[in-house]
Amino acid sequence: MNTKKLLLVVMVAFSLQSNAQRFFTKGGEIFFNATSPASPEKIEAVNKSVVCVVDSKTGAIQFSVLMKGFEFHSALMQEHFNENYVESEKFPSAVFKGQISNNEIVNYNKDGVYTVNVKGKLTIHGVTKDVESNGKLAVKDGKINASAEFNIVLKDYSISIPALVAEQVAKIASIKVACSLELLKN
Amino acid sequence: MSRKKIKLILLALILVGAIVAVYIYKEVNRKPVDTASTKPDFVNTALFYLEEFQQLDSVAGKKYNDKLLQVEGMVKEVSKNERGFYTVSLGDSSSMSSVRCSIDSASSNNASELIKGSVVIIKGICSGYNADELLGSDLILVRCYINK
């Protein structure tokens, strides 16, 4: 085998290996809940088009979500969310970029459930903050179910609630993430 | 001020109050757009919409975001998540990009019957464009209704 052929084989092998390390979904879910004890009704929404990529080798993890994709049961609530609170026209997406800090405990090639710690930067409403949360990775039949729950302080992301309804909206929103990821094949 | 005038003013105030109360009640209880029965703002193919967003997504976004789009396209994939919700991807099977339609629960039965490669018409609210070089860029529609 001459040098050129050898180089090509190495490049192809490297390319296949690096692709095989990535798992992804375009249909993950994020649940948002900002219901307070004084809320007359539940202030909650779901987004079913969350994009998530996990690199099994490095533990890098990334989420992105379109803010206009959050579905509320009330049209008025959805309008207030997009127009007044998160200003979706100006800041169309929220992004998380982080790292599974204990990635070495996860065997992506073997069925199992792993509690992982994720640290990274979450950008909402144009504001980026450090976040850290525990989550769960369940490996089954070559797919991964990733789930996590954490809270965000709305004020931290410059999301201000008008005084008139301040008591009716929780100051801390709970976020639940649920994604079923599959191997990225190119 | 005569008693008659006071009565009239009170009556007017009660009437205005009632109108405001009815308006607030209706607004608070207003449901999102019923995509099944509402006439679409735009009618076109999946490939047409994708091409417009690929050219300049900011311009296309201003035109289509929050609007009810009717999309005709080839079914690339039908996926069901763990809670039973369907997403239908429309577009060219050789491309990574799709119009991703998050199906409304009222249309779930129709989604389960869709066949990969068939052509379907779906209506949904445009929530934006996910530009992604690695995974392929997608136009996202929510609360989608499948036309039979």
Image (spheres, coloured by chain):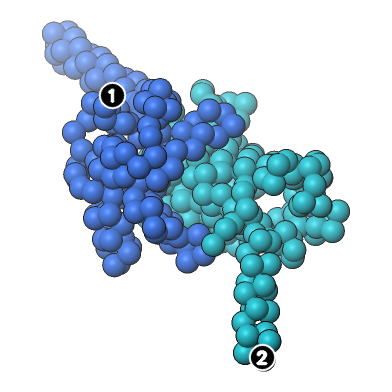
Chain colours: A cyan, B blue
Q: Is residue A170 above or below residue B128?
A: above
Marks 1 & 2 on one chain: no
Going by the image, does A100 lie left or right of B63?
right
Q: Which mark is residue B23?
A: 1
The answer for which chain carries disc 2 is: A
Between A44 and A62, the one lying in front of the other is A62
Q: Residue B68: in sight, yes or no?
A: no
Q: Amino acid at mark 2?
A: Asn
- Residue A150 % position (x, y): 69, 44
Up/down of B72 relative to A89, above or below:
above
Residue sitting at the far right: A105
Q: Circle 1 sits in a helix, a strand or a loop, which is it?
A: helix
Where residue A79 appears, x then y in whole percent?
38, 40
Expressed as whole percent of the image width and height from the top left, the position of residue B6 reads: 19, 13
For the point 24% across and 20% down, the residue is B19
What residue is at 76 percent from the left and 57 percent from the top? A100
Identified by mark 1, the residue type is Tyr
Q: Is residue B57 in view from this perspective?
A: yes
**Label 1–label 2 contact, CB within 8 A:** no
Would residue B137 appear left or right of B72 to someone viewing this image?
right
Q: Which residue is mark 2?
A: A2
The residue positioned 62% from the left and 26% from the top of the image is A37
The answer to whether B118 is drawn above or below residue B10 in the figure is below
**Front in this rendered view, residue B106 or A126:** B106
- Chain where mark 1 sits: B
Helix, strand or loop at label 2? It is loop
Extreme residue in the bottom direction: A3
